[in-house]
Amino acid sequence: MKGTKTLPLSHVNQLILIRNFANLQLKGIGRIQASLQIAHQWHEGEGIHFTRKVRALARHYQVFEQLPIERRGGRENVLSPLKDERL
């Protein structure tokens, strides 16, 4: 459809993670155990780092009611010495 905005895939994945995390918590599963289950589903159980990121993402969404601002790439207008033609 013309004129509609679509979310980047990273945002869709984050929203799916938050939804799954919330569903597990509604079933009475604690935060750590819920994040471990999600890590197992998404990354075959690899890494404590991912479980912490899931909990941090869920906490951010709970507090601010929005996804965190993406701080990587995609900035066209960032001042960079590489864009300065004089260099």
Image: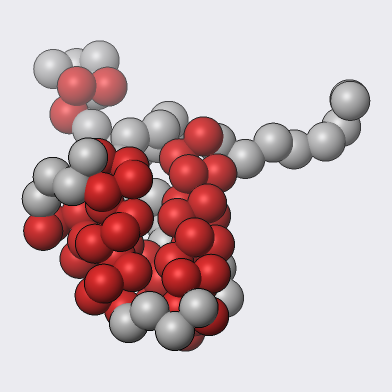
Examine the rendered structure and indicate whether residue 78 appears above or below residue 69: above
Report whether 62 appears left or right of 3: left
| Res. 83 visible in picture | yes
Q: Quadrant of residue 4?
A: top right
User: Residue 22, how many percent across, how many down?
Assistant: 50, 72
Q: Nearer the viewer, residue 84 or 48?
A: 48
Q: Quadrant of residue 53?
A: bottom left
The residue located at (24%, 40%) in the rendering is 43
The residue located at (89%, 25%) in the rendering is 1
Q: Nearer the viewer, residue 27 or 71?
A: 27
Of the 4 image quadrants, the one containing the C terminus is top left
Report whether 43 appears left or right of 42: left
User: Residue 16, how many percent across, how many down?
Assistant: 52, 51
User: Residue 23, how many percent across, how many down?
Assistant: 53, 69
The residue located at (19%, 21%) in the rendering is 82
Q: Quadrant of residue 21?
A: bottom left
Report whether 30 appears left or right of 24: left
Examine the rendered structure and indicate whether residue 74 appears above or below residue 29: above
User: Residue 27, how many percent across, how many down?
Assistant: 50, 78
The residue located at (26%, 72%) in the rendering is 33
| Res. 55 visible in picture | no
Q: How is the rendered protein coloured?
A: secondary structure
Report whether 23 appears left or right of 1: left
Q: Nearer the viewer, residue 38 or 53?
A: 38
Total count of labels: 0
